Image: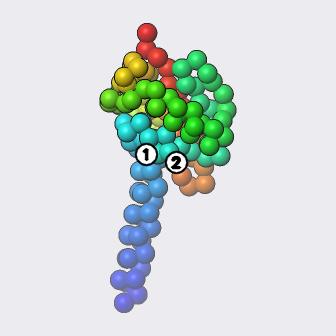
């Protein structure tokens, strides 16, 4: 009985760890694909660096969410094409192209490890000219 309980605990811990990882950069990418600002910022800490078109700064999570919501309101998402995704010593990163009704944008996502999960360190959305 103790072996079964131990096995269940190990499998549960592994499942939870994988779930937390999937919510990191994959959650940001899925939020971008849907044009869902809340889903994008759900994967952020208290604040992060956001570059949105020609504005750049460190924003609190709620401020960044509102800026992204306004952006997605003016630029309906058609598709997000993930070009590259990788790992660095401090977290994951991804580069992609966001196609919207307002044009195409290059997106750079940089994550950092924070208390056993990865959160957005920097998000850049810049118009491709």
Mark 1: few, some, or many residues within 10 Å (few <14, many ≥20)?
Answer: some
Residue drawn at x 63%, y 24% is 56
- Residue 124 in the image: state x and y as whole percent: 53, 27
Q: Secondary structure at mark 1?
A: helix
Residue drawn at x 38%, y 76% is 8
N-terminal of the pair, mark 2 or mark 1, is 1
Instruction: Look at mark 2 in the image and give the residue it sits on.
Output: 42
Distance in Å between CA atoms under marks 2 and 1: 8 Å
Tell me, for residue 27, which label it has, or none: 1
**Vertically, is 119 above or below 16?**
above
- Residue 52 in the image: state x and y as whole percent: 55, 25
Is there CB contact under 8 Å for labels 2 and 1?
A: yes
Q: Is residue 15 left or right of residue 116?
A: left
Q: Residue furthest top?
A: 129
Q: Name the image colouring.
A: rainbow
Q: Nearer the viewer, residue 127 or 107?
A: 127
Q: Nearer the viewer, residue 3 or 85?
A: 85
**Vertically, is 68 above or below 118?**
above
Q: Quadrant of the N terminus?
A: bottom left
> Is residue 84 at all visible to an observer of this figure?
no
- Residue 11 in the image: state x and y as whole percent: 38, 70
Residue drawn at x 67%, y 32% is 58
Residue drawn at x 57%, y 33% is 67
- Residue 116 in the image: state x and y as whole percent: 56, 55
């Amino acid at each position: 009985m103790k072996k079964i309980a131990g096995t269940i605990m190990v499998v549960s811990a592994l499942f939870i760890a994988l779930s937390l990882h999937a919510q990191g950069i994959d959650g940001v990418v899925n939020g971008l694909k849907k044009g869902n600002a809340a889903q994008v910022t759900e994967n952020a800490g208290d604040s992060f660096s956001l570059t949105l078109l020609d504005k750049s700064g460190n924003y609190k999570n709620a401020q960044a969410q509102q800026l992204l919501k306004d952006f997605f309101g003016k630029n309906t998402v058609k598709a997000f094409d993930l070009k590259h995704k990788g790992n660095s010593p401090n977290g994951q990163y991804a580069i992609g192209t966001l196609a919207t009704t307002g044009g195409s944008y290059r997106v750079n996502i940089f994550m950092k490890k924070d208390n056993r999960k990865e959160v957005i360190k920097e998000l850049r959305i810049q118009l491709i000219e």
